[in-house]
């Protein structure tokens, strides 16, 4: 299996970690990405250098949305 390159849509443009983007994986490209269900602070996106914007999803850590994802995964009592 080929390793993704740094400019791969499957890697976070901020840190290089896997971003878990379903759209970047042909096996799950028909599913909505996790980022569609969270609110990412526009300041986080603006902090990226212009050449890295709109290239790939940030990872949940860099997008600062880990708490939102964990809350969404909890069952409602």
Image (cartoon, grey):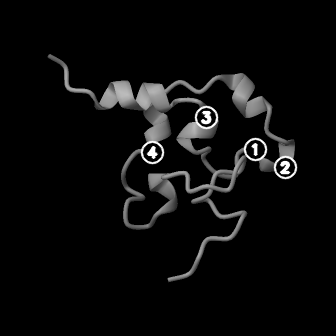
Residue drawn at x 46%, y 26% is 67
> Mark 4 Cα within 10 Å, few/some/many (few <14, many 20+)?
some
- Relative placement, left or right, of 47 versus 8 is right
Q: Earlier in the sequence, mark 3 or mark 2?
A: 2
Q: Are marks 1 and 2 in contact (CB under 8 Å)?
A: yes
Q: Earlier in the sequence, mark 3 or mark 1?
A: 1
In the figure, 76 relative to 48: above or below? above
Mark 1 falls on what kind of element? loop
Whether tag 2 and tag 4 are in contact, CB under 8 A, the answer is no
Q: Residue at image x 69%, y 24%?
A: 42
- Whole-angstrom CA distance, mark 3 to mark 2, is 17 Å
> In the rendered structure, which disc, 3 or 4, sits on the residue that comes first in sequence?
4
Query: Could you tell which of marks 1 and 4 lies nearer the N-terminus?
Result: 4
- Secondary element at image label 3: helix
Report x, y in % for residue 74.
26, 27
Give the mark toward the camera: 3 or 4: 3
Residue at mark 4: 33
């Amino acid at each position: 299996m080929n390793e993704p390159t740094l400019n791969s849509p499957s890697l976070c443009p901020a840190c290089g970690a896997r971003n878990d983007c379903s759209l970047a994986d042909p096996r799950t490209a028909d599913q909505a990405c996790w980022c569609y269900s969270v609110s990412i602070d526009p300041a986080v996106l603006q902090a990226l250098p212009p050449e890295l914007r709109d290239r790939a999803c940030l990872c949940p850590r860099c997008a600062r949305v880990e708490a939102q994802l964990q809350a969404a995964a909890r069952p409602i009592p």
